[in-house]
Image (cartoon, helix red, strand yellow):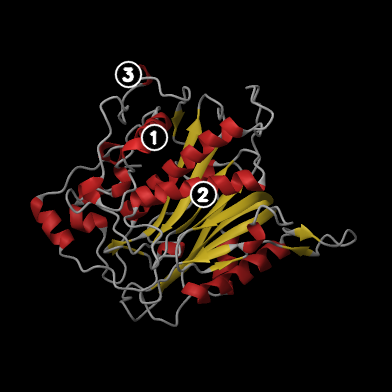
Amino acid sequence: MPTPPTNSIRTIRAHRIWTSTTGSPGCRIPCCTPSPPDSVPRAGHSAAETRPVPGGHVSSTVGPRNAITDVAGVLVGHHQELDADATLGSGAATGCTVVRVPGGATAAVDVRGGGPGTRETDLLDPGHTVRQVNAVLLTGGSAYGLAAADGVMRWLEEHGEGIPMDPSDPSRVVPIVPGAVIFDLPVGAWDIRPTAEFGYRAAHVAAPTFERGSVGAGVGARAGAVKGGIGTASVYFTDGPAAGHTVGALVVANPVGSVFDPRTGLPWGAGTDGPEWFGLAPASAEQLSRANALPVKGTVLNTTIGVVATDAALDPAACRRLAVTAHDGLARAVRPAHSPLDGDTLFALATGTVATDSNIPLPPAFPADLLLLDELCTAAAVCVERAIVDAVLHAGPVAGIPTYRELFGPGSAPQR
């Protein structure tokens, strides 16, 4: 993978400040999206070449895996059934993904799409009693796929993970497992979808290292006209209010909206970092013609779902803000996003595994972690944006759905 710019978060902060009065990089109308002025730092420039950004100096890089599991305390596991000869309507082509947090993590959720399929999201309201979760389920199978959560709960119960309900018997726990689904039923046979056994197996294999692309909940995903899948990204702060902290994202890209610019063939989500960061270049006229001739995704239900996580110690309200801001990355990478035909849902987790030591004075009316949270939220949006591109670039062929790499050539393959 190309060496990422150390000023990547500073870049998006500058872009955010500039576009607050001139337009949004997430605008649904391609022709009205302006280009940033020359004063905005470009991906690939060194810190010395970057002009100061209002709000302070912030430097960052990607984590060692460039994955959500760079956040200490986060594990990811997949389970899927995929027949090599699966088609639209026959064979097995579905799966689920479990984000497991041993010992629990503070959590929140933000649901933006018009057609969500979810579980335990009301529980995550910051005003409600339960403040931690043990795992998050991302699954195919539409509402049927929520059955996979039963298997996740069974695995957690067997391993003593959950809310302890009986001081005299530590085995009596209630695991908390929120979840969200994508609509992938037309890919493969309609009646083959994740079951409780899928969830159990995904929880069992959860680890720091995991596959991306057409795996787990991403097996049957379609991102507009091309193959979708699972993608991930991370950001590690080297200085500033969030120094020493990591933010990561894991996304299942299955939107009705487009994930690439029909004028260039470049992913919309490459706009912040620049296509060179992903090893991409504009497509040829022949490639564009072929890609733009693909039929529009015709399913009524779709959805992009995911998890953002940090190792900071956040309360539920701060977690909720992290989830809210993470949706900005979705809107940059998918056009349109949050439509009536999507169930776009992002969960946020805070493991609290890295201590926060802020001595920056703030007015007493503000929370002590305000500046930290601001940087984490900025990174969450960047991670979601990169993760969606990552999902599209890693997606392999399933059921004859064209992949981005098939359309635009091997040069679009991600370098890792």
Q: Residues within 10 Å of mark 2 (few under 14, many from 20)?
A: many
196 up-or-down from 309: above or below: below
Label 3: element kind:
helix
Of the two numbered discs 2 and 3 on the same chain, state the one appearing first in sequence: 3
Whole-percent x and y of residue 101? Answer: 63, 51
Residue 271 position by quadrant: top left
| Amino acid type at image mark 2 | Val
Query: In screen coordinates, is 265 left or right of 104?
Result: left
Q: Residue furthest top?
A: 48
Of badges 3 and 1, nearer the viewer stands 1
How many numbered circles does the render carry?
3
Query: In screen coordinates, is 235 left or right of 124?
Result: left
| Amino acid type at image mark 3 | Glu
Whole-percent x and y of residue 233? Answer: 44, 44
Query: Rounded to the nearest whole Å, what is the CA distance between mark 3 and mark 1?
Result: 16 Å
Of the two numbered discs 3 and 1 on the same chain, state the one appearing first in sequence: 1
Q: Which residue is mark 3?
A: 49
Label 2: element kind:
helix
Q: Which mark is residue 324?
A: 2
373 up-or-down from 159: above or below: above
Label 1: element kind:
helix
Query: Rounded to the nearest whole Å, what is the CA distance between mark 2 and mark 1?
Result: 17 Å
Whole-percent x and y of residue 178? Answer: 61, 62
